[in-house]
Image: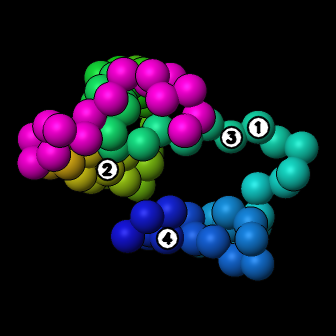
Amino acid sequence: MGINSDRWRIEDGKIVKVSNGQPIPDDEPIFILRARDRLAVAALSHYIELAEGDGCNDYLLDSVREMLGRFQDFAWNNPQKMKQPGVTRGK
């Protein structure tokens, strides 16, 4: 599925929010977690806690919980692919 999900898609080389068709502006920083990052599951779990505490809506919470499940499945099924962040130094 990759970046093309229920929330985001790639369109003309840009990441676009599906719900409103708006691309992320070039001057707005983004942060991507990969499933092979061995800290990603903990980061997503903590993000869910923060989002719940902030009163985020079910749309966001359900989406992040679904992604957390996919990250957990990947980690469980691919232990040989899990890496410490930055260990490959961009390679």
What residue is drawn where x is 14% and y is 37%? Answer: 79
Residue 91: image location, x then y, percent: 55, 38
Q: Is residue 56 above or below residue 39?
A: below
Q: CA distance from mark 2 to mark 3?
A: 17 Å
Task: Using the rendered view, name the quadrant where residue 78 is placed.
Answer: top left
Label the magenta part by its dominant secondary structure. Answer: loop
Q: Is residue 76 visible?
A: yes
Chain-order first, disc 3 or disc 4: 4
Residue type at numbered disc 2? Met
* Secondary structure category for the residue under label 3: loop
State the extent of the magenta-drawn residues as a range: 76-91
Q: Quick one: 72 or 51, which is closer to the camera?
A: 72
Chain-order first, disc 4 or disc 1: 4
Q: Which residue is mark 2?
A: 67
Q: Is residue 79 above or below residue 52?
A: below
What residue is drawn where x is 82% and y is 42%? Answer: 28
Q: Are discs 3 and 1 less than 8 Å apart at CB?
A: yes
Q: Which residue is mark 3?
A: 30
User: Is 86 contained in the magenta span?
Assistant: yes
